[in-house]
Structures are given as structure tokens and as C-alpha cells.
Amino acid sequence: MIDRRKKAVALKYIEGTEAPVILAKGEGSKAEVMISEAEKQGIPVTEDMILVDMLGIASAGDIVPENTWQALAVVFSYILNDQKGQKNSEY
């Protein structure tokens, strides 16, 4: 049976670390609160079920596993390009 509950992982790149750090993880209602709060704060939110499952293996406070770096690079590139596009459209 496939688990269809909503899942979320909060990441942050801390200068001096080799990769982003997992700030928090949640499933179900906790994930919904994490996503809602991120959106309220203007923190980029993207959906990638496979990546969130891969990151779910690690614990909060851990650096993201190396096997996720390539997928995260794609996600971060998308977010940065989207933010750049939004800034350019404001002028």
C-alpha cells in the first residue's frame, strides 16, 4: 500500500556547510502546518515526492544525504530562477 499522507522537509543552507541542513520534517497535519507557515513567510515551497522520501531517511539537524545533492540542485535552481523572474517582473 502506498502512503499518501502529505510530507514536508524544511531545508536551509548554512554558510560553511557542504550542503543544506534539514531543519524540520513532518507528515500529515504537521506537514500541512509547515507548508502553510513557509508560504506565509514567503519561503519557497516546491513539491517532489521522491525527494522528500529520500530526505525523510535523515534526521532534523543532519546535512542532506549526498545521494540527494543532484536532485536538490535542480530544485534550488528552479526556485532561484523563479525568484529572479519575479523580481524582474516587478520593474
Image: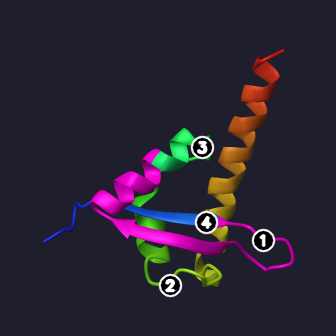
Foreground tag (2 vs 3): 3
Q: Is residue 24 magenta?
A: yes
User: Label 3 amino acid?
Assistant: Gln
Q: Which residues are magenta?
A: 12-36
Q: CA distance from mark 1 to mark 2?
A: 16 Å
Badge 3: residue crowd in 10 Å (few <14, some 14–19, many ≥20):
few
Q: CA distance from mark 1 to mark 4?
A: 10 Å
- Give the number of the disc on residue 78: none
Q: Kindly indicate the quadrant of the structure image that contains residue 22.
A: bottom right
Q: Is residue 53 above or below residue 8?
A: below
User: Label 2 amino acid?
Assistant: Ser
* Tag 1 and tag 4, C-beta contact below 8 Å: no
- Image colouring: rainbow
Foreground tag (3 vs 1): 3
Residue at x 45% of width, y 50% of height = 35
Disc 1: which residue? 14
User: Label 1 amino acid?
Assistant: Ile
- Give the number of the disc on residue 11: 4
Disc 3: which residue? 41
